[in-house]
Image (tube, rainbow, N blue to C red):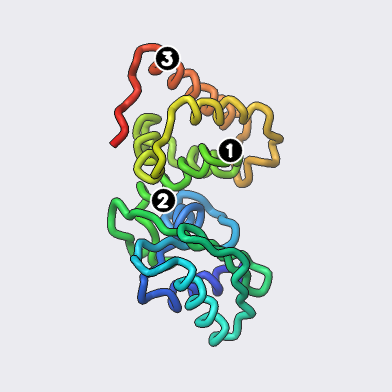
Amino acid sequence: MFAERALEADVLAVGAEFPLALTGGCALRAHGVVGWSRGVGVATEHPARLEWIASQVAVGLGELGWDAQLSERGPLFARLTADGVTISLSKEVFCRPPVRTPAGLALALPDALGVKVRDFVRRGYGRDLSRIAACADSFSWPELEELGRRHSPDGLELPDLQGRLLRTEWLDDTAFTGCPDVARLRAWAHSWSDDIGERLLEGGVPEER
């Protein structure tokens, strides 16, 4: 864990010119919403090609003594490994300016949460849902949906989100990493799914923006 936090600080330092900001679970941890995160996740809206940014980060980490290797590259997502730790870099649209946190520069909480909602719809991971649920007292379901929509270039369809929520019933409890009460989380997801269903029947689907 100490190595991950040290690597995280170094990634932010070598990527400061772009700049890079913590995203996803790392950002939610930086905001104190969750107490854990996996690997290092950072985002930028810098106009330079992400492949080039990732290569610069790898070079900078190497100069700091990390064995950094670029393992995946693309226009919107790149992945590196450094001494066994995964570093994910992504291009995002920042709806609000990144903020300084004790862990370093991070996406504003609404942006970080919107990324998690989008990720959950795309891949359906239980750990994504558990992180979203950690903010349940601060954001309504429609607000969470709107945050996810802002970070979904192809739009966020409520039936897709509803389907993901329903399929959490078939996920093993161990999929909900960091969740202290899986039964409560499942009930919350079921209620959210029911709420979406009622709104769809009533025609309450927001227009894409």
Ranked by sequence position, the earlier of labels 2 and 1 is 2
Q: Amino acid at mark 2?
A: Ala
Q: Nearer the viewer, mark 2 or mark 1?
A: 1
Q: Which mark is residue 112?
A: 2
| Image: 130 above or below 99 | above
| Image: 77 above or below 2 | above
**Residue at the spot x=46%, y=42% of the render?**
118
Residue bearing the label numbered 1: 124
**Residue at the spot x=58%, y=38% of the render?**
124
For label 3, the crowd category at 10 Å Cα-Cα, with few meaning under 14, some 14 to 19 and many 20 or more, is: few
Ranked by sequence position, the earlier of labels 3 and 2 is 2
Q: Is residue 24 left or right of residue 177?
A: left
- Circles 1 and 3: CB distance less than 8 Å? no
Residue 14: name its quadrant.
Answer: bottom left
For the C terminus, which image quadrant? top left
Disc 2 element: helix
Q: Amino acid at mark 1?
A: Gly
| Image: 45 above or below 115 | below
Counting from the top left corner in percent of width and height, residue 43 is at 43, 61
Q: Is residue 89 left or right of residue 3?
A: left
For label 2, the crowd category at 10 Å Cα-Cα, with few meaning under 14, some 14 to 19 and many 20 or more, is: many
Return the residue nearer the eye: 162 or 104.
162
Residue bearing the label numbered 3: 198
Q: Amino acid at mark 3?
A: Glu
From mark 1 to mark 3, how far is it between C-alphas?
Answer: 22 Å
Disc 3 element: helix
Q: Is residue 41 visible?
A: no
Counting from the top left corner in percent of width and height, residue 99 is at 32, 61
Return the residue nearer the eye: 140 or 168.
168
**Residue at the spot x=42%, y=59% of the render?**
91
From mark 3 to mark 2, how far is it between C-alphas?
Answer: 27 Å
From mark 2 to mark 1, how far is it between C-alphas?
Answer: 17 Å
